Amino acid sequence: MIPGNKVNVVHKTITKNTTSYGGSNDTLSAGTTFKAVLTAVRGNEGLMYSKETVSGDYVLYSKLVPSTVKEFDLIFYGTRQFRILFVNQPFQKKRFYILSLLEVK
């Protein structure tokens, strides 16, 4: 059992498509919704581009994670967006997953 409030989060993968002009476009896949516990590990507050910004590192705990989850995918929670930095399965038992996240938006 993972303690904490479970919230609905959406997992989306980024696919890069090359255009006929040699550029690339990033598209997001349709999202997969699952329940997880989202907790903050640490946060930074500072000035960036003449604006006050807050960035944070988060950890997401879940028993059920889509099998397509990998590093650099995106997790959406409401209007917030997180990039997956690391996917961890303690002891490789597949009982629960720990995702290390960085808030990007």
Image (cartoon, rainbow, N blue to C red):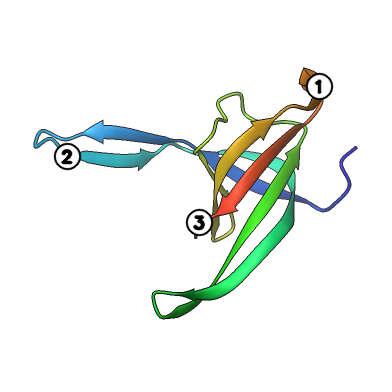
From the viewer's perspective, tell me whether residue 45 is left or right of residue 89: left
Helix, strand or loop at label 3? It is loop
Residue at 31% x, 34% y is: 16
Q: Nearer the viewer, residue 93 or 75?
A: 93
Asked if labels 2 and 1 touch by Cβ distance under 8 angstroms, the answer is no
Q: Is residue 103 left or right of residue 20?
A: right
How would you rate the neighbour count of disc 1 (Cα within 10 Å): few for under 14, some for 14-19, many for 20 or more? few
Q: Is residue 62 above or below residue 44?
A: above
3D distance between C-alphas at marks 3 and 2: 23 Å
The residue at the point 58 percent across, 51 percent down is 102
- State the count of labels: 3
Tell me the SS state at disc 1. helix
**Amino acid type for the residue under numbered disc 3:** Val
Give how far across and how far down residue 71 sits, in percent: 54, 34
* Amino acid type for the residue under numbered disc 1: Phe
Q: Which residue is mark 3?
A: 104
The residue tagged 2 is 23
| Residue at the top extreme of this rendering | 93
Q: Position of residue 53 (x, y in %)?
A: 52, 73
Question: Separation of disc 1 and disc 3 at Cα?
Answer: 29 Å
Foreground disc of the pair 1, 2 = 1
Q: Are marks 1 and 3 in contact (CB under 8 Å)?
A: no
- What residue is drawn where x is 79% and y is 27%? 90
Callout 2: helix, strand or loop? Answer: loop
Mark toward the start of the polypeptide (3 vs 2): 2
Q: Which residue is mark 1?
A: 91
Residue for point 62% across, 60% down: 56
